[in-house]
Amino acid sequence: MKILSVFFFAFTALAAATSKPHPQDPLANAKKVPWERLEIDKALLLILDLQVGLFQLARDFDHTLYYRNMMAHAALGKIFDIPVVMTTSAQQGPNGPLPKEILEMYPDAPLIQRNGQVSAWDNEDFRKAIKATNRTQIIVGGIVTDVCTTFLALALRQEGYSVWANVEASGTTTPLIRDISNDQMRNAGVNVVSLFYIVCDLMKNWNFTPGAATILPWLDQYYPAYGMLARGHAAAVKNGTIIPGEIELISGADGKLELEN
């Protein structure tokens, strides 16, 4: 019996050593973190180190576009009336303050000025400000992506928060650094998403409040691609004129409109 036991264990060890490893499921991490919808009554907006001095480090974006992205990120708190917490790093040094336009949006929101802590979560006042909101879904964007945004996003995930990293509101020095940082956050269950994703998921339905009447002017200011779509539709309906060549773009071969099943 003892000889059989030794043979069995030897055979098991040999089989384990020679067997081919199972390929890793590329969706393994995603399965651990099922899709979660953003909810207005659970969401909190973080304005993280979007400082005038750090702005020059956001080189993976065109600066004009990135400035618009920063302002749009900050304005999410206004359009959806969700709590906002702001923080800066070494504000008295080269990093500088937040843009005055953001400060003017939220004169009464907490502004935690950190002196030394690289990760905002390492600052006790910042942690208290987050916890005081009793919100569990955190929307964040910051400079730079690989440090400010990633460090905080990972810390928040470790604390059990759901995190949405606004990929358009975070900037860093190179596309390579941006991409590996977004991968690191994604692997930790952070939702790496766009501004329009955040807007649409919070809104849910164009007929809700805030709905089309409020959201469309906001998009026209901060997401002009969709604003121009709405403008073009409004102009076409208001003008009511079809020029030669247009009707064929929306009709069948018989010339009849195919707008309904």
Image (cartoon, rainbow, N blue to C red):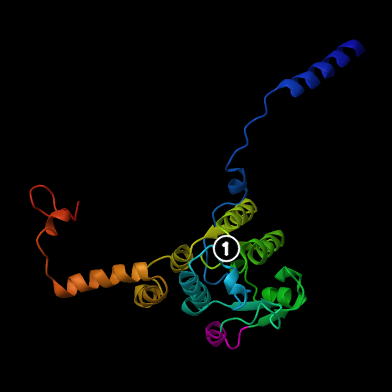
Could you say where residue 40 lies in the image, as x and y percent from the top left?
Answer: 52, 71
Residue closest to the eye, 146 or 15: 146
Left or right? Give the position of 10 relative to 42.
Answer: right
Question: On screen, 53 above or below 157?
Answer: below
Res. 111 image quadrant:
bottom right
- Please, what is the three-letter code of the amino acid marked with disc 1? Ala
What secondary structure do most residues of the magenta stretch adopt?
helix
Question: On screen, 160 above or below 89?
Answer: above
Q: How many marks?
A: 1
Residue denoted by label 1: 165
Could you say where residue 2 lies in the image, as x and y percent from the top left?
Answer: 92, 13
Q: Which residues are magenta?
A: 100-109
Could you tell me which residue is drawn at 84 percent across and 19 percent down? 9
For residue 107: magenta?
yes
Which residue lies most toward the right here? 2
For residue 90: magenta?
no
> How many other residues sit within 10 Å of disc 1, few (<14), some (14-19) or many (≥20)?
many
Res. 242 image quadrant:
bottom left
Residue closest to the eye, 137 or 153: 153
Question: Quick one: SS at disc 1?
Answer: strand
Quadrant location, the N terminus: top right
Residue closest to the eye, 132 or 21: 21
Question: On screen, 163 above or below 238?
Answer: above
Could you say where residue 32 lies in the image, as x and y percent from the top left?
Answer: 62, 48
Is any atom of residue 1 visible in this view?
A: no
